[in-house]
Image: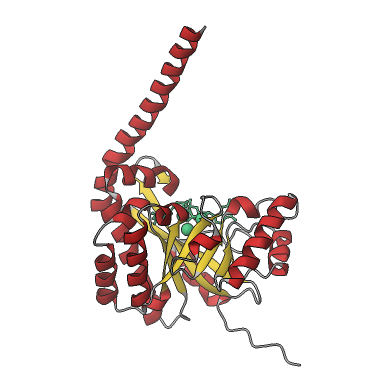
Amino acid sequence: RSKANAHNGYRVYQEQMSEGFSAYLTLGGGLRKAIEEGQFELYYQPKIRSSDEVTVGAEALIRWHHPEKGMIPPDQFIPVAEESGLILPLGEWVIRKACEQLKTWQDQGLPPINLSVNLSGRQFLQPDLVEVVQQILLETGIDPNLLELELTESMLMSDAHGTIKKLHDFREMGITLSIDDFGTGYSSLAYLKKFPIQALKIDRSFIQDLGIDGDDDAIVKATIAMAQSLNLKVIAEGVESRQQMNLLTDYECQEVQGYLFAKPMCCDDFEKYLETFTQIVPPIEG
Ligand code: C2E
Ligand code: MG
Ligand code: MG
Ligand code: MG
């Protein structure tokens, strides 16, 4: 029996390994070419201010238009890019593209919005990341206050000294820092207080059952309350229903992102969207 199990375990392991390996071969091989040939595109998902539901920012989300496989979602190729090291040129492309886009919107006279970019673990460990970002800011000439970098808890937990230095460098440049997928890692808010960050994005998994699972309500409420007392802005990810939105407004969550308002959009669609949803709403009289 134990022999059979061992054998079975080995086979499962082999299958998983070869599955991962073949994904690596098929996607990893194509990635280098995809970078050279420009098969990537940034999509933009609006960030909505809860108090008046005005769009105040967006998150840039990468898409890969594979010539044979069609659109490949980032969850499938970012890990492959990390593994192969191609995340460095790819991640740099994302930051540059996002900054160029901010510049274009500024030149078009659109209302200024904040744009956030996701960093991956290996990219964050890149020794010259600060210089790379600095160079892109110089080249594009955008206001660094409009750029936000999304980090994850695990990035902050790894090499604490170098991490804090990098974060302070970004802050000195005027860049906003936020923690993505908050609540899925092992860090506490008290621990995060050591880092110069400005915002927390509560992971979608806590928002999904808001109003259904009392535990999630308690977690979200407590996170928002504690973040407020630490002067951190809170953004809820993955808001899909009006009920979730109403609860988040009750809990005083400042900003939300989710399908209730808009899915990530290609640049053209996002520009059309912006014309309608960023108008400054006059304060209510009385
Ligand atoms: P993330 O940074 O947490 O981004 C949010 C993800 O949730 C996006 O998936 C978005 O499309 C999705 N989402 C937003 N609102 C809703 C909603 O109401 N319901 C549901 N079900 N989903 C919603 P996407 O674009 O597939 O990206 C997945 C992840 O891939 C991102 O998670 C991020 O970690 C990573 N990623 C995306 N773009 C980049 C990038 O340029 N660089 C790096 N390093 N990672 C990226
Ligand atoms: Mg994100
Ligand atoms: Mg993320
Ligand atoms: Mg997230």
Q: Residue at x 45, y 80 (%)?
A: 110
For the residue pair 69 and 29, the one nearer the viewer reads as 29
Quarter location, residue 151: bottom left
Question: At 34% across and 78% down in the image, what residue appears?
Answer: 142
Where in the figure is residue 141, as x and y percent of width and height? Answer: 29, 79
Observer able to see residue 73:
no
Between 170 and 64, which is closer to the camera in this rendering?
A: 170
Q: Tell me where residue 122 appears, x and y as whole percent.
A: 32, 51
Query: In the picture provided, is 44 more to the left or to the right than 243?
Result: left
Q: Is residue 262 left or right of residue 125?
A: right
Q: Nearer the viewer, residue 118 or 130?
A: 130
Q: Quadrant of the C terminus?
A: bottom right
Q: Position of residue 193 (x, y in %)?
A: 50, 66
Left or right, 85 with reference to 5:
left
Residue that appears at 40% across and 54% down:
155
Q: Relative to 61, does residue 225 appear above or below in the rendering?
A: below
Residue 283 in picture, x, y percent from top left: 67, 88
Position above or below: 264 against 282: above
